[in-house]
């Protein structure tokens, strides 16, 4: 599952997707790949100088091979009050 889920990695909604329970107590069946990165790279945008995650890639726990590189598109150099969006040509 890939997308702008518009929710934080610690939210109950994302916990339901990953574990089937809103408190995250269920057995994880999906891994949010953003959590596999070093802590200083775990963000997809900046809001008022705070790095946050709203975009997620969830893979089944059986997935062994993957390559992940987060593109921080416009996250460091955006106008105040704007949420970064990819440009389409």
Image: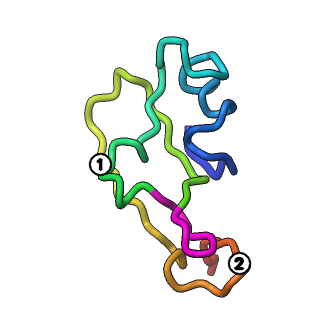
Q: Magenta stretch containing residue 60, yes or no?
A: no
25 vs 46: above or below? above
Residue 84: give x, y in percent of width and height. Answer: 63, 73
In terms of image quadrants, where is residue 35? top left
1 vs 41: above or below? above
Viewer-closest of 39 and 60: 39
Residue drawn 41% across the image and 60% down it: 70
Residue 9: give x, y in percent of width and height. Answer: 55, 42
Q: In which quarter of the image is the N terminus?
A: top right
Q: How is the image coloured?
A: rainbow
Residue 64: give x, y in percent of width and height. Answer: 27, 29
In terms of image quadrants, where is residue 47? bottom right
Q: What stretch is highlighted in magenta?
A: 43-51
* Residue indicated by mark 1: 67
* Residue indicated by mark 2: 82
Crowdedness near tag 1: few (<14), some (14–19) or many (≥20) residues, C-alpha within 10 Å: few
2 vs 41: above or below? above
Residue drawn 65% across the image and 87% down it: 79
State the CA–CA distance, disc 2 to disc 1: 29 Å
Residue 75: give x, y in percent of width and height. Answer: 53, 75
**Label 2 vs 1, first from the N-terminus:** 1
Residue drawn 57% across the image and 38% down it: 10
């Amino acid at each position: 599952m890939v997308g702008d889920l518009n929710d934080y990695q610690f939210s109950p909604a994302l916990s339901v997707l990953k574990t089937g329970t809103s408190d995250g107590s269920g057995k994880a069946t999906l891994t949010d790949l953003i959590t596999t990165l070093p802590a200083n790279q775990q963000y997809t945008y900046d809001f008022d100088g705070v790095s946050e995650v709203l975009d997620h890639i969830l893979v089944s726990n059986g997935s062994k091979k993957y390559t992940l590189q987060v593109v921080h598109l416009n996250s460091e150099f955006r106008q105040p009050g704007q949420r970064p969006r990819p440009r389409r040509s």
